[in-house]
């Protein structure tokens, strides 16, 4: 049995909205990851089984290795189809905001979502949700939004309505936000949920292969280059940095998603407990920052203080609107400031 972590009053409200409304929009954050896509397409398939008029909209596109996900081809990308997306949003009666806690995380979509009079339901697991929704289902202790979507469906009494496609999407989000169940994954109820998704017919080994083992040769060579030439280990701080310029990405025919997971690699060095990856964005004039840690080191605090960002304790992100040189200097300032925490014995 799953514990009932979502408050009954929130379940009741979602149930009431679902019985009253037909036109539903699902949105998730910019550069959607496996959990953003898994939770939103999982919800999409669930709502489709009730014949709802559902549209999933993301601020921009997502990486190739997630394109196999059922119904991913039906997603509207706001940066390419703004007019159509705005029209769909303006007619929406209900909007699910999945896997983000602040309107700033949906970039240019912010305005039309904010202005919409539709009932808004947030389902998310990031700390400190902003109060822009009618219903806020926010549980930072749960490792993925996809798991929360499963829990919501279950509490609505609709386990039977979960299709194979819905189960595949939910499983993918649970898997990617825990690094294939290697971190944030000690809650025994995760495995109860996986078991019930397996009962729906998912092939978890196949999903793993589709997500993690379908990279290009260029990506592997870029990884080799990065580890050999661009990873700097600050042994006395138990920290590591990787940085990548636009030119370097071009040299390896970079496509979105190619650097996914790079930030985790330095954490496999025995003593390293904090890793930062700086990448000049290929679409926007900024440096995208990814931060990871093991144990209790709070990379969300560093993301917030130094890189205009936030996130989870062990996985965070941010953005720097400055030169690479200055971004590297911010990293150095951060490890100096946090030296005590970085060097303390766990
Ligand atoms: P990633 O490194 O995979 O891009 O992001 C890891 C986590 O950091 C995300 O799941 C999200 O919670 C958070 N994150 C990433 N980028 C940003 C950002 O620009 N701002 C904030 N507030 N959080 C971010
Ligand atoms: Mn997530």
Image (cartoon, rainbow, N blue to C red):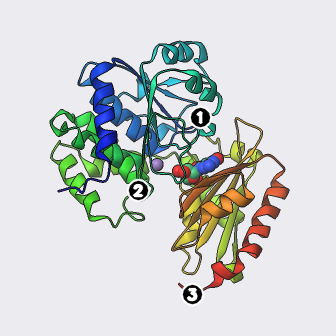
Q: Quadrant of the N terminus?
A: bottom left
Q: Which mark is residue 219?
A: none
* Nearer to us in this view, 119 or 75: 119
State the SS at label 1. Answer: helix
How far is the residue under mark 3 from the one under mark 1?
38 Å
Query: Tags 1 and 2 in contact by the CB under 8 Å rule?
Result: no
Q: Badge 2 local density, few (<14 within 10 Å), some, or many (20+)?
A: many
Whole-percent x, y for residue 244 in the image:
72, 53
Residue drawn at the location 76% of the way across and 43% of the way down: 286
Q: Is residue 288 left or right of residue 136?
A: right
State the SS at label 3. Answer: loop
Name the residue carrying label 2.
143
Label located before the other in sequence (3 or 1): 1
Name the residue carrying label 1.
106
Q: Badge 3 local density, few (<14 within 10 Å), some, or many (20+)?
A: few
Q: Which mark is residue 345?
A: 3
How far is the residue under mark 2 from the one under mark 3?
25 Å
Whole-percent x, y for residue 208 in the image:
35, 51
* Nearer to us in this view, 306 or 290: 306
- Residue 213 shows in the view: no
């Amino acid at each position: 049995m799953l514990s009932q972590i979502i408050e009954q009053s929130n379940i009741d409200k979602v149930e009431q909205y679902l019985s009253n409304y037909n036109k539903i929009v699902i949105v998730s954050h910019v550069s959607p990851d496996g959990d953003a896509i898994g939770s939103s397409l999982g919800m999409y398939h669930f709502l489709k089984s009730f014949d709802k008029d559902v549209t999933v909209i993301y601020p921009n596109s997502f990486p190739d290795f997630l394109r196999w996900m059922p119904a991913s081809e039906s997603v509207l990308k706001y940066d390419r189809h703004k007019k159509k997306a705005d029209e769909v949003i303006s007619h929406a009666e209900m909007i699910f905001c999945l896997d983000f806690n602040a309107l700033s995380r949906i970039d240019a979509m912010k305005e039309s979502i904010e202005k919409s009079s539709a009932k808004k339901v947030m389902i998310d697991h990031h700390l400190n949700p902003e109060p822009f929704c009618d219903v806020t289902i926010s549980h930072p202790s749960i490792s993925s939004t996809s798991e929360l979507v499963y829990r919501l469906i279950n509490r609505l009494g609709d386990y039977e309505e979960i299709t194979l496609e819905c189960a595949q999407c939910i499983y993918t989000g649970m898997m990617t936000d825990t690094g294939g169940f290697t971190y944030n994954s000690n809650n025994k109820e995760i495995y109860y949920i996986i078991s019930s998704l397996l009962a729906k017919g998912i092939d978890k080994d196949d999903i793993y292969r589709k997500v993690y083992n379908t990279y290009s040769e260029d990506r592997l060579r870029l990884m080799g280059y990065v580890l050999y030439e661009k990873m700097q280990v600050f042994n006395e701080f138990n920290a590591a940095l990787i940085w990548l310029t636009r030119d370097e990405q071009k040299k390896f025919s970079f496509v979105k998603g190619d650097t996914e997971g790079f930030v985790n690699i330095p954490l496999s060095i025995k003593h390293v407990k904090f890793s930062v990856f700086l990448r000049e964005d290929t679409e926007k004039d900024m440096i995208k920052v990814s931060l990871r840690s093991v144990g209790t080191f709070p990379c969300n605090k560093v993301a917030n203080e130094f890189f205009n960002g936030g996130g989870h304790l062990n996985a965070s992100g941010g953005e720097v609107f400055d030169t690479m040189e200055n971004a590297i200097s911010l990293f150095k300032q951060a490890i100096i400031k946090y030296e005590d925490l970085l060097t303390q014995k766990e």
